[in-house]
Image (spheres, rainbow, N blue to C red):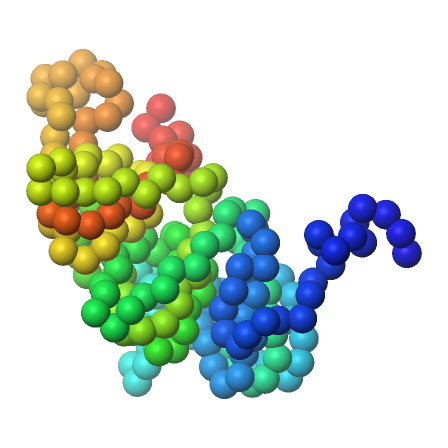
Amino acid sequence: MKGDLFSSEHVVQPAAEPGMSVENAKCIRYVVDGEMYARQGAMVAHRGELKFERKGQGVGGMLKRAVTGEGLPLMAVRGKGEAWFAHEAQNCFVVEVESSDRFTVNGRNVLCFDTSLSYEIKTVKGSGIAGGGLFNSVFSGQGRLGLVCEGTPLVIPVTAQSPVYVDTDAVVGWTDRLQTSLHRSQSIGSMLRGGSGEAVQLLLQGDGFVVVRPSEATGQKAQQH
């Protein structure tokens, strides 16, 4: 078989290492030898002896029903083999979480993660007035976290001297040691008159990074308009 489709650019090569890696801009490969967790419905291909088990109640001893309060269900992938994960052709990225790290992420951006990572669902002050929901997940431990993002994300440094304001529909996540609060950029009167459409943002202060996608939640914006 010949043609550009069958060039080395597209044909899957042998995995260089076990665990998670970026296969291409739109897909993550996971070489499984034991167990890992992924978003339900995110598997696009697999080979080997793998079993997929729907998890309606989370991870660990008491499996939580979702990665976030937005209701993102998980599945456990067990066995020995490899699987590929993707979501709506969004861009894929791998975050290396170190033992001293804590990374807060919106559930809509979680694709898969190592079982060595733990997370807790937390209410985030000021987050989720729009599309993000009041709940995000805080990942900790040591391992890899696979994320998806519509478009190429912006990673914006935050310092004590330079806080950052983020649309709550656009925020993907942020690093530890950042404090969040709700910032209202318009008066009630201005909002009642229509305003700018950017009435509320998430204010991040401290020292770290915030990850922002270059688009807003289309479903929520459609409702607003």
Q: Quadrant of residue 80?
A: bottom right
Q: Does residue 15 appear to the left or right of 10 in the view shown?
A: left
| Closest to the observer, 152 or 122 | 152
Q: Quadrant of residue 189?
A: top left
Identify the residue shown where x is 52% and y is 64%: 21
Task: Give percent across and percent down for residue 204.
Answer: 15, 43
Q: Does residue 153 appear to the left or right of 40 in the view shown?
A: left
Against 15, residue 24 (above or below) is above
Task: Give percent across and percent down for residue 197.
Answer: 26, 23
Q: Does residue 125 appear to the left or right of 109 in the view shown?
A: left
Identify the residue shown where x is 90% and y is 56%: 1
Against 198, residue 50 (above or below) is below
Identify the residue shown where x is 11% and y is 47%: 206
Q: Quadrant of residue 102?
A: bottom left
| Residue 206 in view | yes
Residue at the extreme right of the image, as rendered: 1
Task: Give percent across and percent down for residue 217.
Answer: 38, 38
Identify the residue shown where x is 23% and y is 65%: 101
| Residue 72 in view | no
